[in-house]
Image (tube, helix red, strand yellow):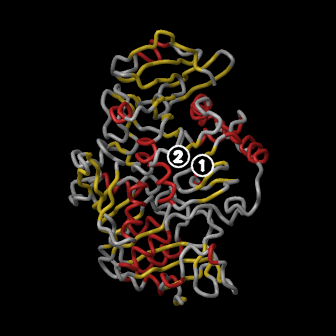
Amino acid sequence: MPQFISAAEAVKLIRDGDTLIYNNFLGMYNCEQLSIALNERFKAEGHPKDLTIYCTAGLGGWAPNTACEQIVTLGAVKKLYLSHYASMPVTAQMVLDNQIEAYNLPFGVMSHAVRAAAAGHDFVISDAGLNLFVDPKYKGYQLNERSKEELVDEIYINGKRHLKYATPKPDVALIKASSVDSRGNISMENEPVIGDPLSIAQATKRRGGIVIVQVEKVLDTPRRPIEVSIPAVLVDYVCVTPEQTQIQGISGSDPKFAGDVPMTDEVLVEYAKSHASTNPKDLAKQLIARRAAKELKPGDVVNIGVGAPEFVAVEAARVGMLPKVALTVEAGSMKGLPMGGLAFGAAMGTQAVCTTAEQFDLYDGGGLDICFIGALEVDKDGNVNGHYNPKKLSGIGGFINITQFTHRVVFCTTFSAGGLEITHDENGLHIVKEGKFLKLADHVTALSFSAQNAHENKQEVTYVTERCVFQLGEKGLVLTEVAKGVDVKKDILDLLPFQVEVAAELKEMEF
C-alpha cells in the first residue's frame, strides 16, 4: 500500500542530481501541484539541484514559466531530454542561448525507450530518424555546445542499418492520475489521454527509484482490475490534490474529454462547426485546412498535428468526412474530434485511448494512411524542417514517427510568416501584406523529413500553403495548384530562392 503524503513532503524525497521522469504530454496529465511544491522547495532551500529531466513529450503550458517549466528556469536543472520544447518558451530560449544541456529525440522513440527500460534493456532499436537530424552522422539531437552526450548509435542487423537509442535511467517518477482506490491502485478515468504511466513506474522501480503519483481523489472501494493504470505495488507515495485540473491552463473538468458524455458523429460535426474560428488571423490556416482536407478518403486512419493541421479536423467535420475517417493524435486518442490550443492531445467523442507507446506502434508500423503536419521550412528538394531554427526551437515531438512511416503526408504551412495578411472573397485570394520570412528555402536548417527517404518509402507527399500546392516530384518540388487571384510569377515564383518545376497542367486551388 503506498504512503499518503503531501506534495511538499513528496518533493523532499528528491535528491540533488536525481533524474526525474515525467508522464506528461504538454497540458495533458501534467502534475502541476507536485511541480509547484518542487519550485517552492528550491526557492526556499536551493535544493534539489543539478537535476536531470526526462519527458517523452514536453512540460509546460505554452506560456512562459508555467509550473512545470519553472524548476528549469529557476536553475535547478542541469540536463533535459525532451521531444518537445515549444510549450516551454523560456526553456527553449535557454537552450538556444547555450545555458543548459539539452537533447531532442523523437517522441515515439522516447516512449518506446521507456518501455524498453521497464523491461531491463539499455537501448531500443528503431528505424525512426534514419538519415534525419538524430542520425549519428548529423548528431542534431545535441541542441547546443553544452550537449555532448552520445545517445544514438547505428547498428546493422542482417546487413540492414538501424538506429540504437539509449534508454532512460530514472530515479524519481512524477505522475498525475485521477484517483487512488482503497487498495492503493491508481486509475486515470478523468484524463483525456494517459501517456505511459505503467512503463514509467516499472522503469523507475527497476532501478530502485521512487514513484510519486498525484491524484484528485481517494475512492472508498477497489477499482475493477481492468481499470487500474498502475498497480499499488509499483507506487511508493500518493499526494491527494483536489485542486488539480484536467488540462493545464483550463479550469474545471469537462466530462466530454474523458468520454463520460457519449457524442454521436452528428453531435461532433455540429460541435466542430459551431466552434470554428472567426478570428481573421486564422484565415490562412483555415484555407490551408480546407484544401488539405480534400486529401482525405473514406476509411482513412489519420494523424492530426499541432498548429495549422488542427484546423483540418474542423474542416473534416464541415465537409462531412469526420464520420468516415478515424482521426488520431499521438497522445493516444482514436476517433472523435481532436482538440487544439491548450487542449491539444485531447479529443471529444474519442472511442478508445491507447498508451503513447501503443499509438506509436501503430504509427511506426505504417498504420496511418495519411497525416497532416506543420513545417517551419521546406526546401527545393522537398525536405522539411519541422523542429528547429536558430531563433525558434519547437522540438521534434512526434513529427518523425508520424511522417517517416505514413503512406500519404500532407504538410500544412503558410507560404511566408511574420506578418502575413490575406483576404479571400468570390474573386479569390488577395495578399494584403507579405510575411517577413519565407517558409521555402534553398536548404533547410535542420532535417526533420527527408525527401530521399520518402522516395525510397514510396510515400506521396503534398505541401499545402494558403496560395498554392506543391507535390514531391522525382527531382524536388513541383508547383501543381495556384489559388484564384494569385499571380503565379509575382506572388510565388519571383519570391522563391530557387527554380521550381511547374506542372504542365497547373490547376486552380480549390477551397
Percent position of residue 9, x then y: 47, 87
Residue under the image location 38 percent in, 54 percent down: 92
Residue under the image location 58 percent in, 30 percent down: 295
**Vertical side of 432 occupied by 9: above or below:** below
Q: Secondary structure at mark 2?
A: loop
Name the side, left or right, on which 145 lies relative to 272.
left
Q: Residues within 10 Å of mark 1 (few under 14, many from 20)?
A: some
Rendering quarter of residue 102: bottom left
Q: Secondary structure at mark 1?
A: loop
Tell me the kind of residue under disc 1: Gly
Q: Which mark is residue 306?
A: 2
Percent position of residue 158, x then y: 25, 49
**Vertical side of 204 occupied by 91: above or below:** above
State the CA–CA distance, disc 1 to disc 2.
Answer: 7 Å
Q: Which residue is mark 1?
A: 340
Percent position of residue 232, x then y: 53, 83
Q: Considering the image in quadrants, where does the N terminus appear?
A: bottom right
Residue under the image location 46 percent in, 35 percent down: 418
Tell me the kind of residue under disc 2: Val
Q: Residue furthest top?
A: 504
Name the side, left or right, on which 6 lies relative to 84.
right
Q: Residues within 10 Å of mark 2 (few under 14, many from 20)?
A: some
**Vertical side of 464 occupied by 350: above or below:** below
Q: Please tell me which residue lies in front, 24 or 90.
A: 24
Q: Considering the image in quadrants, where does the C terminus appear?
A: top right
How many marks overall? 2
Q: Which label's residue is closer to the chain start, 1 or 2?
A: 2
Q: Residue furthest front?
A: 158
Percent position of residue 138, x then y: 23, 45
Question: Do residues under tags 1 and 2 come within 8 Å of each other at their CB atoms?
Answer: yes
